[in-house]
Amino acid sequence: MIKENSKNKFLGGKLTILQQREGFRAGHDSVLLASSIPAKKGDKCLELGIGAGVVSLCLMKRVPGLSVIGIDNDRDIIKLLKENISLNGFDDHISVIKGDLNDGSNKFKNLKRHSFDHIFSNPPFYEKGEIVLPKNINKRNAYYGEKDFINNWIKLSLTFVKSKGSITFINHMKNFPDILSLFKNSMGDVTVIPIFTNVEKPATRFLISGVRDSKKPLKLKRGLILNTRNGKTPKKIENILRHGKPL
């Protein structure tokens, strides 16, 4: 069956992204994750589960001169990703590896250990067995992972990030206790930012980052509120989503 794609604009039209109409579709989570990564010109980054490339492309639009490698296991999405890279003029800055992140670091022998300044990901929210699996393969890969996959992804990140390099994830609040424990047990300078859809509802997402080999304590920062009581987007969020400003 032919997979139909849509062409979507991000960062107020600064990026054009092709996405599967019936597959997983990136949104605010991807842009917020990109805004939170403390990258600077010349840094080397690794995205786990790069998908159509929204996170990395948003990050590269904000920070010039980055080098990014993305890993994904979906052949069709990698093809779409490569189109998005070319469409936005980043052919010389982003490369792609096809691979299963659950296979462990030994499956990625072409990647130099402890060589990345920043590693980041928007991992699936569910483990296998928690939900009815979507029929669309792309949605299935985005929504669920094998048992203990988050632990495996963090181990992989620690293998490839530099000393004092950052690891940043965004995920669903239901997974917060487990992910916080994994970050605290393996990193320092752990920072947590809850994300609220509006001021009247509990947080649904969270950003979490840590620094390898740091001894700094945990920091819980003020949450991000995406909509005010009257349904408007706060200026800070507007600057992130529309103008690509850093968090």
Image (spheres, grey):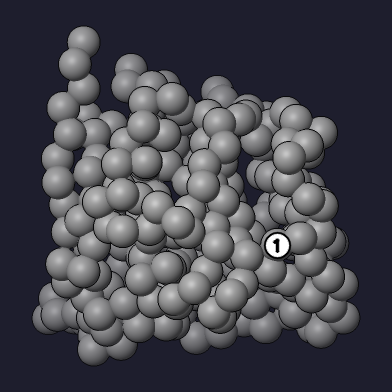
Q: Is residue 104 left or right of residue 66?
A: right
Q: Quadrant of the N terminus?
A: top left
Q: Is residue 241 left or right of residue 55?
A: left
Up-down: is 183 above or below 51?
A: below
Which quadrant holds residue 153?
top right
- Which residue is the site of mark 1? 116
- Residue 170: where, in percent of width, then height? 51, 59
| Residue 203 can be seen, yes or no | no
Residue at (22%, 44%) from the top-left corner? Answer: 18
Name the residue nearer the viewer: 130 or 150. Answer: 150
Which quadrant holds residue 238?
bottom left
Q: Quadrant of the C terminus?
A: bottom left
Q: Is residue 183 left or right of residue 26?
A: right
- Residue 10: where, in percent of width, then height? 22, 63
Residue at (15%, 67%) from the top-left corner? Answer: 13
Q: Secondary structure at mark 1?
A: strand
Name the residue nearer the viewer: 175 or 202. Answer: 175
- Residue 133: where, in percent of width, then height? 41, 22
Amino acid on which the number 1 mark rests in the picture: Phe
Residue at (27%, 73%) from the top-left corner? Answer: 241
Up-down: is 141 above or below 7?
A: above
Residue at (57%, 37%) from the top-left corner? Answer: 97
